[in-house]
Amino acid sequence: MNPTTTLSALIAQSAQQLEAVHAAGQLSFGQGTTNADDEAAWLVLWKLGLPLDTDFSDPKHDVALTDEQVQDVQALIAQRIATRKPAAYLTQEAWLQGVSFYIDERAIVPRSLIAEALADGSIDPWLHTDTSRVLDLCTGNGSLGILAALAFPDVTVQGLDLSKDALAVAHINVERHGVQSRVTLAESDGLQNADGVFDLILCNPPYVNAQSMAELPAEFKAEPELALAGGTDGMDFIRTLLRDAPAHMSEHAVLVLEIGHERPYFEAAFPTLDVVWLSTSAGDDQVLLVSREALQQLPR
């Protein structure tokens, strides 16, 4: 008789598998998890239909598993390793600030640090008291726009994206969270189809520079290139955005922009722009806030 495999043992075994492949340079994290332990727990619990917050260190939850359950989990871990697909695409679910979103290969896996700023209130001091309209530009699967609607119950949100595929995913999430009355979606090349002016613009644009794009791990290359590639210095979309944004901003509006690891390129492109860098779990140089007034000072 084979020894019984428990939930905690299977998670530990799966983590060891993932870490070994990661250490060999043949697996990457960063699309919902940052390490093998967290990703193993996510995949195992999801495959077994258990809550992702299950405390498997507690003996009462550390249940014995059937051979079939173990085999199903092992097949999923093998699929993750062989295909290099992000775990979120395999589970068709991603979590951002504790909120669940549907996701598939049509849209980038949601992981924006702007979500932290919405959740912790670090944007709030810059918002005018009559803030009522929010724009989520490059909305992808709609997560930031939906989180904004949840954070500010009195606002309406427009989500824009160039990708029809991504917007199809965003529609699923808008309906899933029941915010159809306050969140609208539209296809748009940048701000082209922005509906009027906004008090707050959120944007997690394509900002990865060309050299970094060429060096991306397979997991990130599984995502839509349109959502990542920002040109030679990563600033192609951002240049147009900062030029056009003031026309779509109310008098006291602010723009919150994520630029990843591209701060040196950003400051080289906009050396005179007065911005505020927001603190996030990834540091103080990846998300910035800029006012309409500051943007109007940029050379035209």
Image: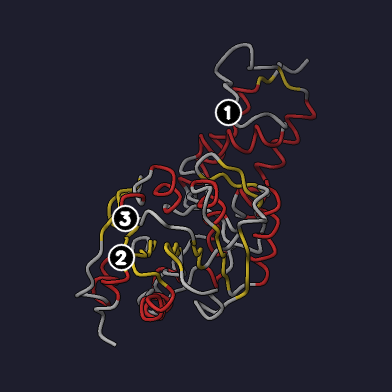
Q: Residue at x 39, y 42 (%)?
A: 120
Name which residue lies at 51% across and 63% down: 136
Q: Nearer the viewer, residue 14 or 266?
A: 266
Real-space CA distance between mark 2 and mark 3, rounded to the nearest whole angstrom: 10 Å
Query: What amino acid type is highlighted by mark number 2?
Result: Val
Relative side of 209 to 84, left or right: left
Label 1 secondary element: loop
Q: CA distance from mark 3 to mark 1?
A: 34 Å
Residue 53, labelled with which disc?
Answer: 1
Characterize the local packing of mark 2: few (<14), some (14-19) or many (20 or more) Cα atoms within 10 angstroms. Answer: many
Please, what secondary structure does the residue beneath circle 2 have?
A: strand
Quarter of the image for residue 222 reads: bottom right
- Is tag 2's residue or tag 3's residue first in the polypeptide sequence? 3
Give the left or right position of residue 116, taking residue 47 as reference: left
Q: Residue at x 63, y 63 (%)?
A: 184
Say which of marks 2 and 3 sits in front: 3
Q: Which mark, by number, is residue 126?
A: 3
Q: Is residue 84 above or below residue 66?
A: below
In this view, the residue farthest toward the left is 272
Disc 3 or disc 1, which is closer to the eye?
3
Give the percent coordinates (x, y) of residue 183: 61, 59
User: In what quadrant of the picture does the N terminus appear?
Assistant: top right
Residue 42 at x, y percent in the picture:
60, 37
Marks 1 and 2, the one that precedes in the sequence: 1
Q: Quick check: 176 above or below 166?
A: above
Quarter of image, res 290: bottom left
Amino acid carrying label 1: it is: Asp
Using the image, determine if residue 124 lies above or below residue 132.
above
Amino acid type, residue under disc 3 in the picture: Trp
Q: Nearer the viewer, mark 1 or mark 2?
A: 2
Q: Which residue is mark 2?
A: 290
